[in-house]
Amino acid sequence: MSVSESATLPSTRAELDSDLDSDLDSGDLKSGDLKSSDLDLGKMDQVRRRMLNPFLMRGFMLVKMPLGLFAGLRLRALDAEHCQTSVPYGWRSTNPFRSIYFAAQSMAAELSTGALAMLAIEQAPTSVAMLITGLEASFGKKATARTVFTCEDGPKIFAAVRETLATGEPATAQVETVGRMPDGTEVSRFVFTWSFKRRR
């Protein structure tokens, strides 16, 4: 699925409550858990816009992720369901075998899931800690061009944040991101396990 920067978050309480009702039906939430009135949609959208601002994102990386900045990572698209990041093919990111080094791919892959996690915790009414507790990866082809990672598991992350807010217990989300070159060739696939815990 293509993701554009114009993608928006749920704009009304009714839309978000519909999403939460789906979580109730699937068992992700229990009756009486967090509802949309507990979520700060305005703040979440402000955070999304800041993260998509190239200048502000580069400043964030300079302070918090200098290796990602050096490698040329870019946040290309972000909303409550999807995220796209990219890593260029060039001297900063390639290995001696003329493909993008797996560590550079890992950084871009992690960012495509971590940006969703950051977006999710920003809407929370109380502070939530986030941490990667698991990682699986597979590499199918050599990455010989700019590679774009797409994660479409935002709902899983938001459900885990809502769960820890409702219960106070740790909640996890296992999310997948796939890296592809411009011609559509899949080069790698990562599965990250994120853990969330409401701070006291």
Image (spheres, rainbow, N blue to C red):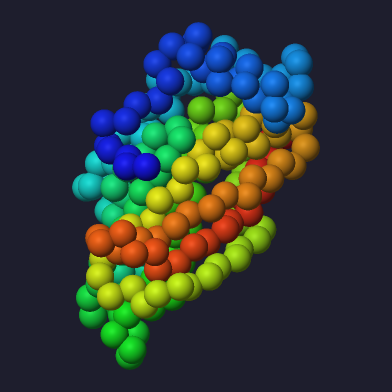
Q: Which of 188 and 11 is in front in this view?
A: 188
| Position of 49 relative to 131 (above/below) | above
**Left of 114 or right of it: where is 196?**
right
Q: Position of residue 94 (x, y in %)?
A: 31, 80
Q: Position of residue 161 (x, y in %)?
A: 62, 34
Q: Residue furthest top?
A: 14
The answer to whether any part of residue 58 appears in the image is: yes
Q: Position of residue 182 (x, y in %)?
A: 25, 60
Asked where in the image residue 4 lies, by quadrant, the reply is top left
| Position of 143 relative to 34 (above/below) | below
Q: Determine the residue positioned at 39% across, 56% down.
A: 149
The answer to whether any part of residue 147 appears in the image is: no
Q: Where is residue 192 in the image (x, y as percent from the top left)?
A: 58, 56
Number of marks in the rendered image:
0
Q: Can you say which quadrant of the picture contains the C terminus?
A: top right
Q: Which of 6 and 52 is in front in this view?
A: 6
Q: Determine the residue positioned at 52% across, 42% down.
A: 153
Q: Which of 59 and 109 is in front in this view?
A: 109
Q: Determine the residue positioned at 61% across, 63% down.
A: 135
**Left of 136 or right of it: where is 50?**
left
